[in-house]
Amino acid sequence: MAVRAVVVEADGGSRGNPGPAGYGAVVRDPATGEVLAERAESIGTATNNVAEYRGLIAGLEAAAELGAAEVEARMDSKLVVEQMCGRWQIKNPGLRPLAAQAAGLVGRFASVRFSWVPRERNKHADALANAAMDAAAGLTPTGPVVQPPREVAVPEPAVREVAARAATGRATGTDPATTPASWEPRPTEEATRLILVRHGETERTVQKRYSGRGDVPLTDRGRAQARATAARVAALAPSVAAVVSSPLSRCTATAEAIAALVGNPPVRPDDDLIECDFGVWEGRTFAEVRDGWAGELDAWLASTRIAPPEGESFTAVAERTGRAVDSLRKAYPGETVVVVSHVSPIKLVLRDALAAGDAFLHRLYLDTAGVSVLDLYPDGGVAVRSVNDTAHLSDL
């Protein structure tokens, strides 16, 4: 039976840096400390950092084989921990593919937390790594290096937690996994309808720059797009219960144009709808980021749990946009709400509405001033009516 949460301890090293290298990884039960799996391997000639990343990858793979959902990864390598958290750049080209592979594995879990620990608290993984290094150097290991993962029973508290969450979802009807499936069209009057609008064009969208928390205004074309979008929204919903917007001016200006044609409700700002914080990438072109932060970019693209340096992960963005959507569903049952936001929050809302995977985020294109519509039902049901409607922009 799969385990819910595990601790991964990983280490790696070489005799000479570079030199005969190896790694070790241990997977433990966080409650009892019981060893659930061990991994170790000699990897020939390599550097300390390469071996450390290989140890992390092996530990995450073992955790995935055990069916873990939550992982705390502990290492005594400050470099690997800081790079995986997105706080340090990956300047060594040889580490970038390994960081991207690790980030891809991170995406297989519900949550992964990285922690630096002193070497004395990482003795088991260190011993495995040293035995693997000895083997790489042609020495005979003094004891077993690798143990295969074994099936373990789920601790009773975890069983109760999973069962309670499933029972709550069935009782409230708000868990998409437990909402009854149906092919039959549902009455729209029961739903809270969200009309999702991406803001109009800005200079940064034209220049293909990362545009997150920077407050850049609409261009002249962006303002024309906002007016055209307002007419489109008014055709969809002549009267709405509310217009909610990211607090950034490119969104509020778009929202105000829409509000003027749908009964003139006040535009209510919501910080949960703000764009992703792109950290040090803010204002830089896509090409500049690829040139200067290739490893970090690969890791970010591989996992929604990885943040840009000094920025925010898509997992964090999804948490707050989910909170905003749930709040609107509860506040406006059976009514229509216009939501003006940015490309990342809207993509994440649509990903979750369609129960899609993270690859959806890189395959969906959302134009500036594009309109998407979804209905949210009281029992947790969702109907996506349209995505990225841009017919109203054809004359601009």
Image (cartoon, rainbow, N blue to C red):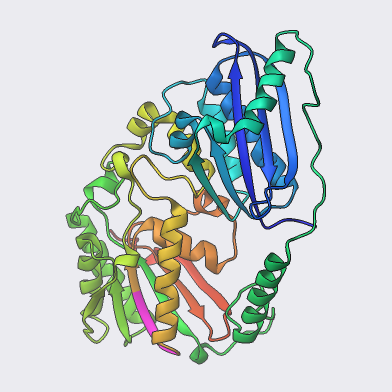
User: Is residue 392 visible in the rendered structure shown here?
Assistant: no
Residue 259, given in percent of the width and then of the height, sits at 24, 78
Answer above or below: position of 23 versus 379: above
Answer above or below: position of 165 versus 365: below
Magenta portion: prevailing SS class: strand
Identified at 61% across, 83% down, the residue is 173
Answer above or below: position of 211 versus 236: above
Q: Nearer the viewer, residue 14 or 69?
A: 14
Choose top left, top right, bottom left or bottom right for residue 141.
top right
Identified at 53% across, 42% down, the residue is 302
Q: Nearer the viewer, residue 102 or 141?
A: 141
Choose top left, top right, bottom left or bottom right for residue 235.
bottom left
The magenta stretch is 334-338
Is residue 336 part of the magenta span, yes or no?
A: yes
Answer above or below: position of 329 versus 37: below
| Left or right of 148 in this view: 367 | left
Is residue 41 part of the magenta span, yes or no?
A: no
Residue 90, given in percent of the width and then of the height, sits at 43, 28
User: Is residue 328 visible in the rendered structure shown here?
Assistant: yes
Q: Nearer the viewer, residue 17 or 198?
A: 17
Identified at 68% across, 42% down, the residue is 27
Residue 307, given in percent of the width and then of the height, sits at 42, 45
Residue 340, given in percent of the width and then of the height, sits at 32, 68
| Left or right of 387 in this view: 59 | right
Choose top left, top right, bottom left or bottom right for residue 316.
bottom left
Q: Nearer the viewer, residue 156 or 368?
A: 156
| Left or right of 210 in this view: 24 | right
Locate the C terminus by quadrant.
Answer: bottom left
Identified at 69% across, 81% down, the residue is 180
